[in-house]
Image (tube, rainbow, N blue to C red):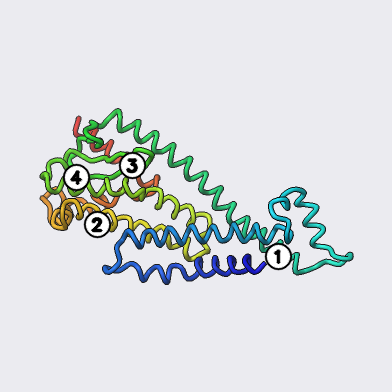
Amino acid sequence: MTLAIGLVLAATVIGVLGPWYLAAMVRPAVRPGLALVAWASSAVLFVGAMLVASLLLALPKGSGLDGFIGMAGSCVNIVRQDGDVVWAHVVRLGVAAVLFSLVMRVAVVAVGAVRRQRRWRRDHVSLLGALARPDRGVFWLDAPLPVAYSVGGRRGWVVATSAVDGLGPRRRAAILSHEEAHLRGRHHLLVLGAEVLASALPFVPLCRRAPAAVRVLAELAADVGAARRHGTGAVRSARPCGAGPGWSRVSTVAVVLMSAVPAAFATASAAVLLLLWCLTRV
């Protein structure tokens, strides 16, 4: 019982105060990858603490895993003692039910999100196979604007327009390395997990603020990975403000930060790329 109460308190502290202590890690002195791990670990601990606490509270004392057998009868026995309702047991089972329902809601939302993501990724890759030119792990689309993003998955793909290839080897390598860093770090899964928590438990501060924080940290971590391979100068020159004339019409979000977008926005971006491709063929 003491362990269960401790886990409930831990989940409450992480869920409510998590954004406050995690915000202290978003500063130049802390590596973005470490801050990203801290956010992901806090989310896992939050959900895990709720799950374990609900099981400890629901199982009769000393019953162990055998308490799952005949749980309905066990619940009746611990709720009534000498014919009277033991309210401590009622409260305990009520808290266990609430915690378990929250965890199950996260699981249901996660299953739906993963299915939608897989369906979108399959359709997106199929579309790229018909329109793009694969070359050394990169899908190249003929389009006048420089756009690059990555598609997560078991293998993962980088998608870029031919305009990126025309920016020069230094900028091109920095942009592609940024997207490859997203794939190596599995940033798409981290963003998807944060979005699942925000959708399932929006009233929890940690879950509500997780998507925005994880997206920013994923981008910073990818920049660090690209800078480690090609230098900070190359990464800085790949930004629109330091590139050629064509980049002045494209925002930083559209050029470099597209790899962590949700499926809906990524679908819209694919439609834009398809439109650009069709216009170049008219």
**Pointer 3 or 4: first along the chain:** 4
Q: Tell me the element at label 4.
A: loop
The residue wearing badge 1 is: 92
The answer to whether residue 92 is visible is: yes
Q: In which quarter of the image is the C terminus?
A: top left
Q: Are marks 2 and 1 in contact (CB under 8 Å)?
A: no
The residue wearing badge 3 is: 151
Disc 4 to disc 1, how far (Cα)?
A: 58 Å
**Pointer 3 or 2: first along the chain:** 3
Amino acid type at circle 3 is Val
Amino acid type at circle 4 is Pro
Q: In this view, does 103 lie to the left or right of 238?
A: right
Q: Do the residues labelled 4 and 1 touch (CB within 8 Å)?
A: no
Q: Is residue 212 left or right of residue 255?
A: right
Mark 1 neighbour class, 10 Å CA radius: few under 14, some 14 to 19, many 20 or more: some
Amino acid type at circle 1 is Arg
Instruction: Identify the mark at residue 224; answer none if there is no mark.
Output: 2
Residue 198 at x, y = what percent? Answer: 48, 57
